[in-house]
Amino acid sequence: MIDFHTHILPGIDDGSRDIGQTKELLRQAHRQGIHQILATPHFYADRDSAGHFLRKRKESLEIVQKLSENEEWIPEIKAAAEVYYFPGIGKADLLPKLCMEGRLLLLELPFAQWTSGMYRDVEEIVEKQELTVMLAHVERYYEFQKDRRIWESMFELPVYAQINAGSFLRHGKRSFGIKFMKAGHQVLLGSDCHHPQNRPSNLKSGRVVIEKKLGVGMLEEIDRRGGLMWEHAELFTEKK
């Protein structure tokens, strides 16, 4: 089981404040059977330089990795970032440094009506930069799309949709996620965990709802896709 969206690295964003909170989030993940975690601290290009962010991420990741020297139960962790959209991001040469192993980009889009400019930027990331794009917590954008033509066009691109597991625990968001997956969109799951109590690791709880509503086959497909993405993100610029 892979968690593709977390804020477990201590002291880098609005997620874990310290190594104690990080250890508790990792314990929660371990108890659920999560074996791989993508650490995705927030990156805002208008607030931080890529160089400064990468130094902070490296230092924070090293602190966490030291835990695994004595704690074998700690899941495998890879580093990326939750990169917030900015105009012109399609041409930004800093993106590979913010990706998982230089290939998989977790992109957060604005909570507003998407525009043709946003679409063109995402298209350029995929087609010109040849990165694999995973759109963060897609269930949180839908209500803002009064004109759904760009939404529909966005998901005709070879992009992947990350859905927060916790959304399946809330009726309104649950309905969106179920319909979205029934429509055949290619989904990856994340907890988007920030805090052991307020925003915990809850991947397993969301998966229980998915299995109940859509069957174990849907989870098997999500896990198959996630496993391949974890090992071979470079192969996923085009949908399989």
Image (cartoon, rainbow, N blue to C red):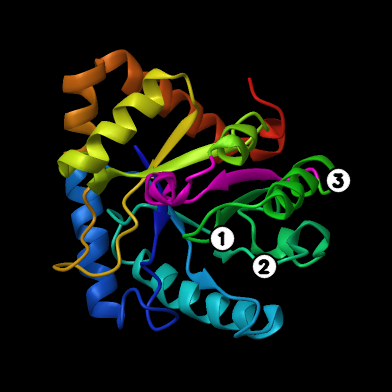
Q: Secondary structure at mark 1?
A: loop
| Drawn side of residue 175 relative to residue 66, left or right | left
User: What range of the chain is rendered magenta?
Assistant: 130-147
Mark 3 or 2, closer to the camera = 2
Q: Residue drawn 53% across and 38% down?
A: 148
Task: Mark yes or no: residue 129 visible.
Answer: yes
Q: Which residue is mark 3?
A: 128
Q: Residue drawn 43% across and 19% down?
A: 183
Q: Position of residue 111 (x, y in %)?
A: 46, 60
Q: Position of residue 191 (x, y in %)?
A: 31, 51
Circle nearer the N terminus (3, 2): 2
* Circle number at residue 86: 2
Mark 3 or 1, closer to the camera = 3
Q: Residue drawn 26% across and 18% down?
A: 214
Q: Quadrant of the C terminus?
A: top right
Q: Position of residue 234 (x, y in %)?
A: 71, 38
Q: Secondary structure at mark 2?
A: loop
Q: Position of residue 97 (x, y in %)?
A: 71, 64
